[in-house]
């Protein structure tokens, strides 16, 4: 593939390569479910570990799912938005460290802190993919984090809130991508 030439081309390349980010978000929602189930078992430490270890599998599994959907699963070499996506990953890892530190004090704050962190990351995805839906997703995740932390919700509520929000938005993005593909096809 040739190198992208405009900002809009770079965004189009990212949307095409990763199906608008929906496969990764779907995998992420499933990881949140696993972490919630582990938290239901009563081990905060293991629930944190489940989100962390599962989180490491999100990108490779998301790429694989994108490929199974007929997408490349990788953006064009030289796409400058790839660097922005990587920077947002570093932000997320720093947020994880902060959330983990908070969980050592009060375990129920781990998932709300991660909701805020991941919400912030998705705000960046609005630029990476050129899709406004990521503003809504980031805002909803952040609002859930604030509400759960402010109300002292049990740890499982945070995990299942993350799962519900990400899965809901993943399906909405899949629907947007499907509509975009239909519009792009010649009649």
Image: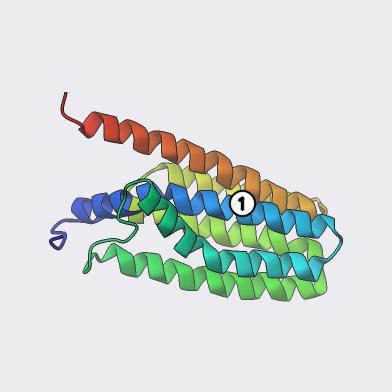
* Image quadrant assignment for residue 177: top left
Q: Residue 136 at what x, y percent from top left?
A: 49, 43
Q: Residue at x 40, y 70 (%)?
A: 86
Residue 115 horizontal side relative to residue 158, left or right: left
Q: Is residue 142 visible?
A: no
When the figure is inspected, residue 3 is found, relative to residue 24, above or below; the finding is below
Q: Residue at x 57, y 65 (%)?
A: 55
Q: Residue at x 78, y 53 (%)?
A: 156
Determine whether the residue tagged by mark 1 lies in a helix, strand or loop: helix
Q: Residues within 10 Å of mark 1 (few under 14, many from 20)?
A: many
Q: Residue 185 at what x, y percent from top left?
A: 20, 31
Q: Residue at x 39, y 49 (%)?
A: 68
Residue 44 horizontal side relative to residue 30, left or right: right
* Image quadrant assignment for residue 181: top left
Q: Residue 95 at what x, y percent from top left?
A: 59, 70
When the figure is inspected, residue 47 is found, relative to residue 9, above or below; the finding is below
| Residue underneath mark 1 | 30
Q: According to the image, what is the colour scheme of the structure? A: rainbow
Residue 175 horizontal side relative to residue 6, left or right: right
Residue 66 horizontal side relative to residue 170, left or right: left
Q: Residue 187 at what x, y percent from top left?
A: 16, 23
Q: Residue furthest right?
A: 42
Mark count: 1
């Amino acid at each position: 593939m040739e190198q992208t030439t405009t900002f809009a081309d770079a965004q189009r390349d990212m949307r095409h390569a990763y199906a608008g980010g929906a496969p990764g978000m779907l995998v992420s929602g499933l990881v949140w479910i696993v972490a919630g189930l582990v938290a239901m078992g009563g081990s905060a430490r293991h629930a944190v570990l489940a989100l962390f270890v599962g989180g490491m599998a999100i990108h490779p599994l998301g790429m694989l799912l994108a490929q199974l959907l007929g997408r490349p699963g990788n953006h064009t070499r030289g796409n400058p938005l790839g660097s922005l996506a990587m920077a947002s990953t570093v932000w997320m890892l720093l947020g994880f460290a902060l959330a983990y530190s908070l969980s050592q004090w009060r375990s129920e704050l781990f998932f709300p802190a991660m909701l805020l962190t991941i919400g912030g990351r998705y705000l960046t995805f609005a630029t990476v993919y050129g899709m406004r839906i990521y503003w809504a997703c980031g805002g909803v995740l952040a609002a859930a984090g604030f509400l759960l932390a402010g109300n002292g919700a049990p740890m499982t509520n945070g995990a299942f809130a993350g799962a519900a929000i990400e899965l809901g938005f993943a399906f909405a993005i899949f629907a947007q991508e499907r509509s975009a593909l239909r519009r792009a096809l010649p009649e």
